[in-house]
Image: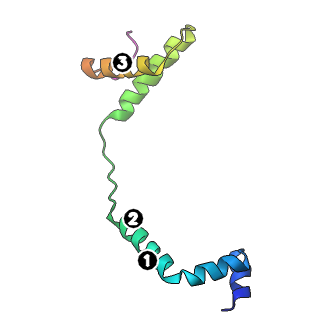
Amino acid sequence: MSVSDIMKKMSIGKSTVYDILKRKHAVQKDVQDLGARISKKVFRVRNSGISELDKALLEWFSIIRSKKYPVSGPECGGRVRYFKEQGRTTAKTL
């Protein structure tokens, strides 16, 4: 593959192609390192009941905002802690 083919295929300039070719081994090592780091990460999905807590917080937030009261981030955090302490997943009784 020629330099002009690479330029057209990748939509990059001539000097960029030459820089990549000059640093070929370093680029290959970076790609391998990146692949190794990505393959080591394990993502787990846990069903912890947070969705019910989120629904309760959203419900509480909607009720408070419908009454035109301002709500801050720390207030939301406090409400989440309150819901967790009470074991509640609904905001019907405030």
Three-letter amino acid code of the residue under disc 2: Ile
Residue under the image location 50 percent in, 12 percent down: 64
Give the side of residue 19 with respect to residue 37, left or right: right
Quarter location, residue 39: bottom left
Label 2 vs 1, first from the N-terminus: 1
Residue under the image location 70 percent in, 78 percent down: 15
- Residue 38 in picture, x, y percent from top left: 39, 64
The answer to whether residue 90 is visible is no
- Residue 19 in picture, x, y percent from top left: 62, 79
Q: CA distance from mark 3 to mark 1?
A: 48 Å
- Does the residue at mark 2 contact the one at mark 3 (Cβ under 8 Å)? no
- The residue under label 2 is 38
- The residue under label 1 is 29
Q: What SS does tag 1 mark?
A: helix
- The residue under label 3 is 78
Q: Nearer the viewer, mark 2 or mark 1?
A: 1
